[in-house]
Amino acid sequence: MSARVLIVDDLFPNIKLLETKLNVEYFDVISAMNGPDALAVCEKGLCDIVLLDVMMPGMDGFEVCRRIKSTPTMAHLPVVMVTALDQPSDRLRGLDAGADDFLTKPIDDTALMARVRSLVRLKAVTDELRSRAMSSRVGDPLAAATAETGHNANVLIVEDRRSSAERLTAALGQYHCVEAVDSPQEALERVKSGDYDVVLVSLDLEGHDGLRLCSQLRSLDRTRTVPVVMLADPHDRVRIMRGLDLGVHDYLVRPIDRNELVARVRTQVKRKRFSHSLRESVQASMDLAVTDGLTGLHNRRYLDSYLAGLFSEPSLRDRPVALLILDIDRFKSINDRFGHDAGDEVLREFAARIRAQTRGIDVVARYGGEEIVVVAPDTGLEAGRQVAERIRERIEAVVFQVQRGTSAIDVTVSIGVAARQPEDGDPSQVLKRADLALYQAKQAGRNRVVAAAA
């Protein structure tokens, strides 16, 4: 796996030692010998992970990490503190500053490479989501990332040692909603119906391989994006490395320090919520691309794509399809009399009533202006005419309230209906017949349905 690793240390021999180890694993190495230079590299997006010494003159590693994690454009960057400091308080200080891990010198090479590979994989996924979210320009998920507290999460603990489960629950229960189970089977049942932000798994479950449960959680659709944290004994080093290679997010070694537990869970919750916000931004951008902003219906782009599929997919080409074109009668007079804001209100209500009278499999799209198209799969001409008549009656039956209920408007609709014929080679022919039927409905006095002759 190739990635750009930034080594930050004020001692050149330390940089060269780490650089040599990382080059063997085919990582590209960048170095900085002080905090400001390290921040400059990070701000330019020149690295994928930071290996950060703590004890440096001027700006120490804690401050560098804090600045990285508090800056929206850098908050997603993994930071591993690599230091001679070995006290629990030092590790906690680093985690509180936002570090993703805290490794004590002398460094175990296997542990270092496993952690670097794991964090680089996570960042690669986040980078892809960030790129899509930022290009969509829907909201600002990066700003939200730095404001996230990492509290009030749903945490599942899988631990069959009762005393340990109680201690873990008590420590995390101050900040989160915590549930504890004692078997993999029960854990899998819970995650099927629950919405968890973090799952903690003991590797030493009696009669079970905790690592297998971790692997299952990483592979299930429902939990694939949920952070998994291993709870391991000191002799579990090999399995810890294996877990990180499988994609497990983090681990804690017994005896578990309460403060470190809280800090590591908080970090995982923040990262999970950041990724979720990115996915929501991407989904929102996808929705905007195919949705009309005023009515919430599908837009013309989506309609064209959908109709093309109906005529090109072999399994769909021979199935009946009815197509309705609906146009509000004398809509211009509504805008002229009540204003364009009232006209928009009418359009939104018009769209809502159409949706209420159509099926889930029907496609309802804004065609342009006040025209709306309904595509009804597996529907013939007569059935399509009945749908149109039902919509027409619903539009006419209830007045449209606008301007916060201070004005009421009688609205009617004209509808043209057509159905696919065996000789139709593309959607334009059905659309043309439906449009002609709409024109005939208008010419015949409006507020009526006309079905195109077969």
Image: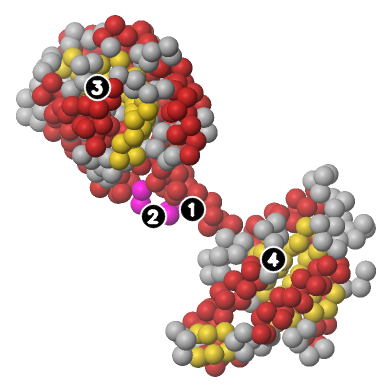
Q: Earlier in the sequence, mark 1 or mark 2?
A: 2
Q: Write the residue at 43% across / 14% down.
A: 208
Q: Quadrant of residue 440?
A: bottom right
Report whether residue 337 is seen. yes
Residue at mark 3: 163
In front here: 272 or 293?
272
Residue at mark 2: 139
Q: Write the residue at 13% across / 33% down.
A: 63
Residue at mark 1: 284
Q: Position of residue 85 (x, y in %)?
A: 11, 17
Q: Pointer 3: residues within 10 angstroms few (<14), some, or many (20+)?
A: few
Cα gap from disc 4 to disc 2, whole angstroms: 32 Å
Q: Which residues are magenta?
A: 135-141
Q: Amino acid at mark 4?
A: Thr
- Secondary element under disc 2, as helix, strand or loop, is loop
- Secondary element under disc 4, as helix, strand or loop, is loop
Relative vertical location of residue 368 with respect to residue 414 in this rendering, above or below? above
Q: Earlier in the sequence, mark 2 or mark 3?
A: 2
Q: Earlier in the sequence, mark 4 or mark 2?
A: 2
Look at the image and say whether residue 413 sits in the magenta stretch.
no
Q: Is label 4 or label 2 in front? A: 4
Q: Earlier in the sequence, mark 3 or mark 4?
A: 3
Q: Is label 3 or label 4 in front? A: 3
Does the residue at mark 1 contact the one at mark 2 (Cβ under 8 Å)? Answer: yes
